[in-house]
Amino acid sequence: MKTEALHVGMKVRHPQYGIGVVKSISENTADVLFNDGKRAVAPEGAGLEPAEAQAEFRGLGVPLKQFVEETLDVAVRKMGLERPDSIVEKLGSRWHNGKMTLQPSDPSLQAKEVPLEAFFHKIIMMRNNLRVLEQKINSHEKLSEGEKIDMQQYLTRCYGSMTTFNVLFKEKEDQF
């Protein structure tokens, strides 16, 4: 492996020392932290290779920014998440630029105002995190079916508690 291909923080595999993390790079050597300690290694002669998948793009037909955005869009959709700018679109139009006021019962205390867009964003993120948790529970290999069902009941209760906020959604299909 050429020294130019290394970067600090990269995981590498050495035939004798195993997997390590590159800590610093000089002209001909790299300091790599292995399980048994830090060693100076000459990458080109030591049989060093990447321990993680590497990607190289040549002749990319689209600008890198566009490629990254499209890749992220696909990943976000597959994970059941939403981009922040798409979240406000799901807020009912009557709530746009609105604010939520939390008024304490003690008149000497100050009220707290929160823009509804910010509050709505937090609610959506909470829903998305519950969905991810649900997927992780369902695909967990060490949980029994009974344990998965038990945890699903807690998630169902969480979704039920969040139905209070359905009034904020523009479309019924986006509600809890």
Image (cartoon, helix red, strand yellow):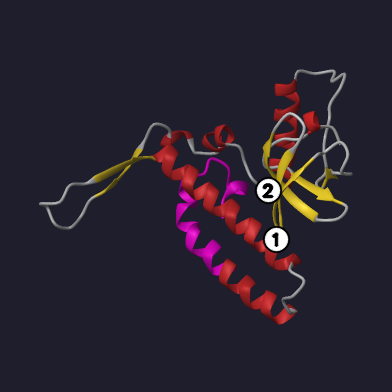
Q: Are marks 2 and 1 in contact (CB under 8 Å)?
A: yes
Magenta span includes 74: no
Per the image, label 1 sits on a secondary structure element best described as helix
Q: Amino acid at mark 2?
A: Gly
Q: Is residue 173 magenta?
A: yes
Provide residue 150's location: percent of width, then percent of height.
63, 78
Q: Secondary structure at mark 2?
A: loop
What span is in magenta? 156-176
Q: Residues within 10 Å of mark 2 (few under 14, many from 20)?
A: few
Identity of the residue drawn at 60% across and 73% down = 153
User: Residue 68 appears at what percent x and percent y?
Assistant: 72, 29
The residue labelled by disc 1 is: 135
Which quadrant would residue 116 be assigned to in this image?
A: top left
Identify whether 55 is placed above or below 149.
Answer: above
> Would you identify the image quadrant in which residue 34 lies?
bottom right
Quadrant assignment for the N terminus:
top right
Q: Is residue 148 above or below residue 26?
A: below
93 relative position to 54: left or right = left
Looking at the image, residue 38 lies above or below residue 84: below
Is 108 placed left or right of 64 in the picture? Answer: left
